[in-house]
Image (tube, rainbow, N blue to C red):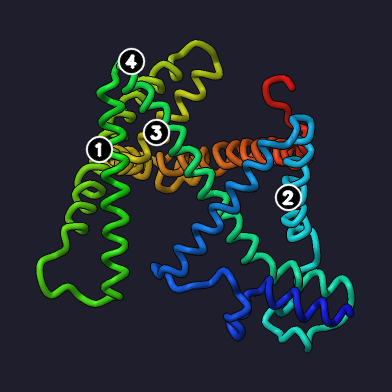
Amino acid sequence: MEAGWRHAVIPWLAQAPAAPALNMWNAPAGTPEIWMKVGIAMLAGFGLLAALIAAPTRLRRPISGAFIFLAGLFWVLVFLFPKPIDSQTPHEQRPRGFVQDVSFWLADAIPVVSNFSNILTAFILGLGVFSLVRIHLMRVAKKQNDWPFSVVLLVSMVAMATFGYWDWKTRLDLGGAKVDEAWPLAAYGKDLLFDGMLQVMEAAMFSLIAFFILSAAYRAFRIRSVEATILLCAALIAMLNLMGAVVVTWDGMIESFGKDNAFVMNFTLSSVAGFIRDNLQTPGIRAIDFGIGLGALAMGLRLWLSLERVGGN
């Protein structure tokens, strides 16, 4: 019975290429079959969501908590359980034993669970798009402040999605073949919207952000205390070290003054900047990363065990 369970379940989780007929999720991209399966999956997902909404309020949190715990438990086991040595070995030739069977089972299940995670991420993205569209449609309908900007946002979203999908479908139909005639309209529209407008506006936005960063750095580096003075000096040395003319001039003066004195050579701008970077900046960043890691671990445990409360509930 154990062997039958292993031979039946593990190949399904692994989605073995040798038996594509057993894989109900697989279909060629862009075919009616895959669209039908996508539609069925969406209907099933909305049905489960509707069932969860229709469930009594007192049962919603335990049901959601159970799903969250099971989903997180899988990745906890993947991280903590012993890793299989060779997951490509045929199943009938693998070592026997509970621990080894579970390790291979987890390794084979990772691609499937990752696909489910990607699907859930797509649904979350869709929920964000739905919320954004709903808010701006209400703003346009009620003629609230700055509602023309909401119209621009909605039109831009629809145009980008339309031309993006159109261009993807056109390239898919070409199958990698070269276009002998004029480039399709979909490619022109997508390149104009994405490369000619979106990326250019993003570059302009980040260029404006640089001035705000400069203003914030000026306010932060003003000498108000000993700590602020140290921070100002370290930042000044780091910025001067990025200026080639300043580095060449200062290091040349130091080398000409104390070329036979090893102690004086430690005061070259590159040496001082390297000391600050290796002995002050890097340990500080590692300490911050360590604190962020502990915070993320604590938040992950609270979410996994459903200990996080929203709205004071």
Q: Nearer the viewer, residue 165 or 292?
A: 165
Q: Earlier in the sequence, mark 3 or mark 2?
A: 2
**Residue underneath mark 4:** 144
Q: Residue at point 33% right, 21% down?
A: 141
* Above/below status of 11 relative to 260: below
The picture quadrant where one finds residue 115 is bottom right
Say which element carries label 3. helix
Residue 133, numbered circle: 3
Mark 1 vs mark 4, foreground winner is: 4
Q: Which mark is drawn over residue 72?
A: 2
Q: Can you give x and y, in whole percent of width and height, for residue 68 in the image? A: 72, 45
Percent of width and height locating residue 17: 58, 81
Q: Which mark is residue 135?
A: none
Question: In which image quadrant can residue 197 be found?
Answer: top left
Vertical comparison of 310 with 246: above or below:
above
Query: Can residue 137 be seen in this snapshot?
Result: yes
Q: Which residue occupies 60% across, 36% down?
A: 284
Question: Residue 118: image x %, image y %?
Answer: 55, 55
In whole angstroms, how far apart are the C-alphas of marks 1 and 2? Answer: 39 Å
Give the structural element (helix, strand or loop) at label 2: helix
Q: Residue at x 43, y 39 (%)?
A: 129
Mark 1–mark 4 distance (CA, rounded to whole Å) = 25 Å
Q: Quadrant of the N terminus?
A: bottom right
Asked whether the viewer can see residue 294, the reply is: no
Q: Which mark is residue 201?
A: 1
